Every structure is written in structure tokens, then in C-alpha cells.
């Protein structure tokens, strides 16, 4: 399961898979050191710099992924104006080997809607997880 993440093909990298806006952000984030992309402001304070070279290096795939029985991609649609994954969603939807889900969250879906993410990981319908979450929240107020 790829949760709002890159799904590179052989030889691709994060750099080649992302949008021009993200490439510019990577370069700007590494301007201070030349090699470590600083995390954007805000967000989780535990985040650390990311090596720029790891974003540039192409992946080499052996083909073993063909043995993976369940290939799923979760597209977080709550940040449509800046997501680098819109084209990837289109590509994977056209591939019969992949199942694509949409969640109406921003990129950090595990923080915004952990119940829906857990439901997807368990193979349950997301609507049931959202309903369960709303019901659990309602039950919490019943005395």
C-alpha cells in the first residue's frame, strides 16, 4: 500500500517523478548546505533534513514486485492544489494491477484520519471506517 507516495518505475527517482514545484522546493531546502533538504516550516518538530542525493538517485527494480498480490495506492485529495501525485493517480487507475483509493485528507492522512487509513490497510471499506469514527465520537458524548 502506497499512502500518498511516489510509485517509481525502474530508473525513476523522486526527482524525476515529482512536480516542478517540488523540485524547486528541494533545491531551496538544500540551499543552506548544498546537500541536505531542510524540512518545511511548521509540521512535526521531529522532522529532520533529508539528503538531496537520495531524491536524485534512480531506483533499480528487479521485477520481484510482480509477486506482490495486493497493489494499492491511496490518493489524498485534500491538497489538490499542490499534490505531486495527481498524474500518478491517473497512471495507476489505468493499470488493472492497481487499486486506487481517494481519501479527502491532506498528505498526512495517518494523522488526519487514522481510522480510514487503518480500514484501508485491513481491506475494509473506507466509508465504513468513517461511519465508525463518527459513531465512536457520538458515543463518547453519551453518558
Image (cartoon, helix red, strand yellow):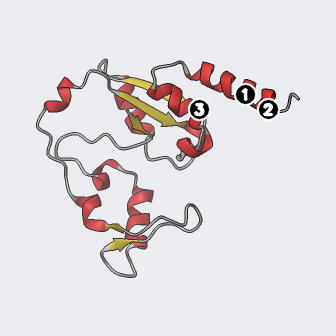
Q: Position of residue 1 (x, y in %)?
A: 37, 32
As drawn, 42 above or below 142: below
As drawn, 87 above or below 132: below
Q: Residue at x 42, y 58 (%)?
A: 22
Q: Nearer the viewer, mark 2 or mark 3?
A: 2
Give residue 123's quadrant in the image: top left
Marks 2 and 3, how far apart in space? 16 Å
Quadrant of the rendering where the C terminus is positioned: top right
Residue 136 badge:
1
Q: Residue furthest front?
A: 143
Q: Residue at x 35, y 44 (%)?
A: 6
Q: Position of residue 66 (x, y in %)?
A: 18, 26
Q: Nearer the viewer, residue 85 or 73?
A: 73
Residue 115 badge:
3
Which residue, given by chain and number where applicable, does mark 2 sit on?
140
Query: Viewed as shown, does residue 17 lie left or right of 19?
Result: left
The residue carrying pointer 2 sits among few (fewer than 14), some (14 to 19) or many (20 or more) residues within 10 Å by Cα, namely few
Q: Are marks 1 and 2 in contact (CB under 8 Å)?
A: yes
Marks 1 and 2, how far apart in space? 6 Å
Q: Residue at x 26, y 61 (%)?
A: 54
Q: Nearer the viewer, mark 3 or mark 1?
A: 1
Amino acid at each position: 500500500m502506497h499512502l500518498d507516495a511516489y510509485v517509481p518505475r525502474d530508473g525513476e527517482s523522486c526527482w524525476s517523478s515529482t512536480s516542478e514545484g517540488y523540485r524547486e522546493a528541494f533545491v531551496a531546502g538544500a540551499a543552506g548546505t548544498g546537500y541536505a533538504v531542510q524540512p518545511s516550516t511548521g509540521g512535526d518538530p521531529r522532522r529532520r533534513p533529508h539528503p538531496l542525493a537520495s531524491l536524485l538517485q534512480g531506483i533499480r527494480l528487479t521485477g520481484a514486485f510482480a509477486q506482490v498480490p495486493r497493489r494499492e495506492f491511496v490518493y489524498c485529495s485534500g491538497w489538490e492544489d499542490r499534490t505531486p501525485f495527481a498524474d500518478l493517480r491517473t497512471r495507476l487507475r489505468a493499470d488493472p494491477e492497481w487499486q486506487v483509493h481517494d481519501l479527502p485528507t491532506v498528505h498526512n492522512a495517518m494523522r488526519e484520519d487514522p481510522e480510514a487509513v487503518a480500514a484501508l490497510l485491513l481491506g475494509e471499506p473506507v466509508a465504513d471506517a468513517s461511519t465508525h469514527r463518527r459513531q465512536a465520537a457520538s458515543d463518547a458524548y453519551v453518558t
